[in-house]
Amino acid sequence: MRFDILTLFPEMFSSPFQESILAKAIEKGLIEVRTINIRDFALDKRRIVDDAPYGGGQGMVMKVEPIARAIEQVKSEDPSVRTIYLTPEGKPLNQEMARQLSSRSHLILLCGRYEGVDERVRELFIDEEISIGDYVLTGGELAAMVLIDTVSRLLPGVLGSDRSAEEDSFFGSLLEYPQYTRPASFRGYEVPEVLLSGNHQAISLWRRKEALRRTWMRRPDLLSKASLSEEDKKILEEISKKDVS
Ligand code: 6GU
């Protein structure tokens, strides 16, 4: 899968893709991440990319021509590319959207700065507008990194095969159960005994209970969307009766 990032700050992207899982995904050729400096597509001598808004008001607006030329260059190489504008006015990103995006082979990610882009960019070139949450960033660059990260890890081979399969059955429904590793005792805090028991059935049940408890405590909104078995519902009833810890 290929990502072309259109930005005024390509340097921001130098390190996030040079570490860990995404670096390996690039090395293996599973993803390709290119940055394109919008300023390279400003044809005037001073390479101006922004201007004051018509009608007056605060701040600067990103000009349409350099963005248009940059997008058209990518589209001339691949007319089927999908163009996404990262903006707090977009649809909030969630796991289902990430899953849908992961089926595409090529995305353009346009990162806005200042007071946003000239509206004609959106009308003429943008297929989809995406936000990463209800708060305001200084620009779309960090949002583009988040999007690339969450989409890439869904691609076959990016995570270990066992991990991706596991994720799919769980995904979007419940929070994770608590995890422990050695030592079994740390400053008087013990690992729950059941996890040391070797009883796989008991361990599974404990983990499901803890996942349900944690979801109920922290994200009750997720429970209405989760697919719950009859046993899950019984466990939840118990939890909601006695547990306030
Ligand atoms: Cl995509 N851009 C900016 N500037 N702020 C945001 C955002 C995007 N998503 C949430 N906040």
Image (cartoon, helix red, strand yellow):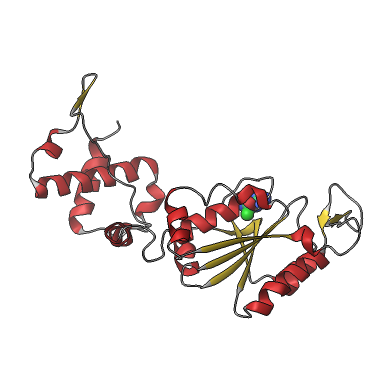
Task: Give how far across and how far down residue 130 sits, in percent.
Answer: 60, 60
- Residue 176 location (% of width, % of height): 31, 46
Instruction: Indicate left or right for 56 with 222 as reference.
Output: right
- The mark tally for this picture is 0
Quarter that holds the C terminus: top left
Task: Name the foreground residue: 13 vs 206.
Answer: 13
Which residue is at 28% across, 58% downward?
Answer: 166
**Residue 135: image location, x then y, percent:** 62, 45
Q: Is residue 204 left or right of residue 107?
A: left
Above or below residue 80? Residue 169 is above
Tell me the residue at 19%/58% (across/down): 230
**Residue shown at 90%/62% (left/top)?**
44
Q: Residue 169 sits in which quadrant?
A: bottom left
Q: Which residue is more in the foreground, 82 or 59?
A: 82
Say which of 64 and 22 sits in front.
22
Residue 170 lies in quadrant: bottom left
Q: Nearer the viewer, residue 170 or 160?
A: 160
Q: Is residue 222 left or right of residue 14?
A: left
What residue appears at the point 38 percent right and 52 percent down from the top-left corner? 222
Task: Give coordinates of residue 105: x percent, y percent.
Answer: 51, 73
Instruction: Say above or below: 28 vs 217.
Output: below
From this viewpoint, which residue is outermost toward the top?
Answer: 187
